[in-house]
Image (tube, helix red, strand yellow):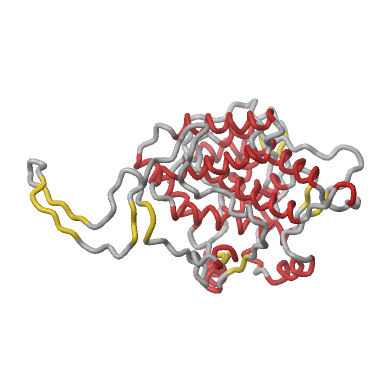
Amino acid sequence: MSMRTLPLLFLNLGGEMLYILDQRLRAQNIPVDKAQKDEWTEVDRKRVLNDIISTMFSRKFMEELFKPQELYSKKALRTVYDRLAHASIMRLNQASMDKLYDLMTMAFKYQVLLCPRPKDVLLVTFNHLDAIKEFIQDSPTIKHQVDETFRQLTETYGGLSAGEFQLIRQTLLIFFQDLHIRVSIFLKERVQNSNGHFVLPVSGPVPWGTEVPGVIRMFNKKGEEIRKIEFKHGGNYVTALREGSFELHGDRVLKLGTNMYSVNRSVETHMSGASKNLASRTQESIPPNPLAKEELNLLARLMGGMEIKKPSGPEPGFRLNLFTTDEEEEQAALTRPEELSYEVINIQATQDQQRNEELARIMGEFEITEQPRSSASKGDDLLAMMDEL
């Protein structure tokens, strides 16, 4: 398991979340002069995206995110995105938040699976950051925050070896293992089967720096080629023309991670039967995690870096529905299996100057030599929330 995976997972899932929210907000846009009090306008859309992106790329939050650490569980990570999605005037109910998270995770899982090289997951991340900067063209301060995160990514991952990137990719795939949620876009484009499994292509460019398959070369002990055998590979591969740019501005070449919702269309999600059964068996077989409280405390510290901007004055929060109608949303909430629904965990992250003794004890059992300073943001005791897990 790589300790450098969390920033890539968070940023790419966050990018997918912004794509989806932007598409739904655009679909519900009403001209400002015709909008009622509870209807979305273009001004509201920009405000929501600005607030979420500003929170997502805040300096304190990024500092916590880039510290070497293991991935959080799916449920704990979902808590971060729930708080992030509500960092503005927008409000999502449980069913819409479930659908949003399903779309985010399946989109990034598809991108990780199709990366030609493990290192290309960094290009996927840059594609997300490039698109996010397009959302905030009118906000130079927030754009600077995104550029600063790009610099941190380059500094953290620029010098990693191919083996280290392979470990990161493997860690991501383990995180997404057993997630087989059917997404209408993928089904229509025939890149996903009816059981929720993705279809890997046998055509297109091969990874940069490699040759099209079809030749076996044999060498003697002096390194001289002595024999060459050709074979039919059964695919339709071509040589990659050039490598994608890893600079701040440049052609990424790779299209994975770009906005697939740029065309206005509705997206549906469905759990496959196999996935439902597997999730049910998993729920029954996994014993309570004794370190779940510790994970929540670490999560609270991470989320303590989020500077949530609360709406000022009497202005109410606007509700966003990710379904076509309210009836569909209500039906989805009723039919979704309980073990597959992520209950929202409310974490109160406050400044606490005293070290949490329980946190220190468990961290000591982990044999971690570098402990956070007492001045760091700490989470309150979260034992009371264990019943909600």
User: Which residue in the rendered view is the most extreme toward the bottom?
Assistant: 273
**In the image, residue 113 lies at what x, y percent?**
45, 55
Q: Quadrant of residue 208?
A: top left
Q: Nearer the viewer, residue 65 or 118?
A: 118
Q: Is residue 11 above or below residue 74?
A: above
Identify which residue is drawn at 74% across, 52% down: 25
Identify which residue is drawn at 53% across, 46% down: 9
Q: Is residue 376 rendered to the left or right of residue 180?
A: right
Q: Nearer the viewer, residue 348 or 120?
A: 120
**In the image, residue 300 lies at what x, y percent?**
65, 41
Q: Nearer the viewer, residue 341 or 291?
A: 341
Q: Is residue 208 rendered to the left or right of residue 112?
A: left
Q: Is residue 69 above or below residue 39?
A: above
**In the image, residue 209 lies at what x, y percent?**
31, 43
**In the image, residue 100 lies at what x, y percent?**
66, 56
Q: How many marks?
A: 0
Q: Quadrant of residue 182?
A: bottom right
Identify which residue is drawn at 56% across, 67% down: 188
Quadrant of the image containing the C terminus: bottom right
Identify which residue is drawn at 7% across, 46% down: 220
